[in-house]
Image (spheres, helix red, strand yellow):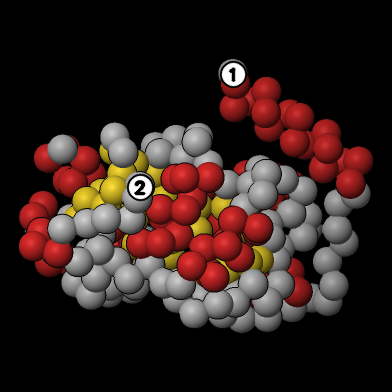
């Protein structure tokens, strides 16, 4: 348990240091037994201690005496309930992903690396107020057959089988977002065909297995 809390703190600080999310924005969780450990509400990541990391049951119950979870804990709960393969989640307000999300647009296959999120493009979840069940629902729609998506006027989210992989995926999404914005400055980029993206996806699957 101590190890899980320390790992969350290490990556929460990396949200700041790797410029994925400033100060206390974004949040991180790791699934544990019938619930998950998550970063707390309103604390700067640079000051976090193990005792600040909050446990929330998959039934949504937590003990306030042990701290208050991130105000966005509901979408962590709903992702763990719906996606059995999810063991860790990284949510970030990273600059470039957020900039695209403010246009309520996803990222098309302008680069084959969009396949890292699991499909032929990266979807953008519809807007709903942060922390609401409505936002959870929208995120789950955008995560259909994917393990990362943008969130309209908000940021991005990535899940994986462990925290190091989820964090890396969030970094990839941010990098792809920057490349897409840069490419748009030269006009409309050429999008890879469906057929080509099918090839990329089957190669990516084998690569992951190997
Ligand atoms: Zn957020």
Q: Nearer the viewer, residue 64 or 28?
A: 64
CB at disc 1 and ligand 1 closer than 8 Å: no
Label 1 sits on a secondary structure element that is loop
Q: Is residue 3 visible?
A: yes
Give the alpha-carbon distance from disc 1 to disc 2, as whole Å: 33 Å
Q: For this view, does 81 lie left or right of residue 66?
A: right
Image x and y of residue 12, in percent: 28, 58
Q: Residue at x 36, y 62 (%)?
A: 73
**For residue 117, above or below residue 48:** above
- Residue 45: in sight, yes or no? no
Element type at mark 2: loop
Q: Looking at the image, is 98 positioned above or below residue 54?
A: below
Residue 148: x percent and y percent?
57, 52
Q: Position of residue 138 (x, y in %)?
A: 61, 65
> What residue would you read off at disc 1?
210
The residue singled out by tag 2 in the image is 58
Taking the spot 90% from the left edge, 49% from the top edge, the residue there is 193
State the residue in front, 44 or 37.
Answer: 37
> Residue 85 bears which disc, if any?
none
Which of the two discs, 1 and 2, labels the residue nearer the N terminus?
2
x then y, percent, for residue 152: 60, 75
At 25% across and 63% down in the image, what residue appears? 69
Front in this rendered view, residue 153 or 196: 153
> Does 95 sit left or right of 76 as displayed?
right
Q: Quadrant of residue 204?
A: top right
Residue located at (82% from left, 43% from top):
197
Label 2 Cα neighbours within 10 Å, binned few <14 / some 14-19 / many ≥20:
some
Q: Residues within 10 Å of mark 1 (few under 14, many from 20)?
A: few
Q: Quadrant of residue 40?
A: bottom left
CB contact under 8 Å: marks 1 and 2 = no
Which quadrant: the N terminus?
top left
Quarter of the image holding residue 110?
bottom right
């Amino acid at each position: 348990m101590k190890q899980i809390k320390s790992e969350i703190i290490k990556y929460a600080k990396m949200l700041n240091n790797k410029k994925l999310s400033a100060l206390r924005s974004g949040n991180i969780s790791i699934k544990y037994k019938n619930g998950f450990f998550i970063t707390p509400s309103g604390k700067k990541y640079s000051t976090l201690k193990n005792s600040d990391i909050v446990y929330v049951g998959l039934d949504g119950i937590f003990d306030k005496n042990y701290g208050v979870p991130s105000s966005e804990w509901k979408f962590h709960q709903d992702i763990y309930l719906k996606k059995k393969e999810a063991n860790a989640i990284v949510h970030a307000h990273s600059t470039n992903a957020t900039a695209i999300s403010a246009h309520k647009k996803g990222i098309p296959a302008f680069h084959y690396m969009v396949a890292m999120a699991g499909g032929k493009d990266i979807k953008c979840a519809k807007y709903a107020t942060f922390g609401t069940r409505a936002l959870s629902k929208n995120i789950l729609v955008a995560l259909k057959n994917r393990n990362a998506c943008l969130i309209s006027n908000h940021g991005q989210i990535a899940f994986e089988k462990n925290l190091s992989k989820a964090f890396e995926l969030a970094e990839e999404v941010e990098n792809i977002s920057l490349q897409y914005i840069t490419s748009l400055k030269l006009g409309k980029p050429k999008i890879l065909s469906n057929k080509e993206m099918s090839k990329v996806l089957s190669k990516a699957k084998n690569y992951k297995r190997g």
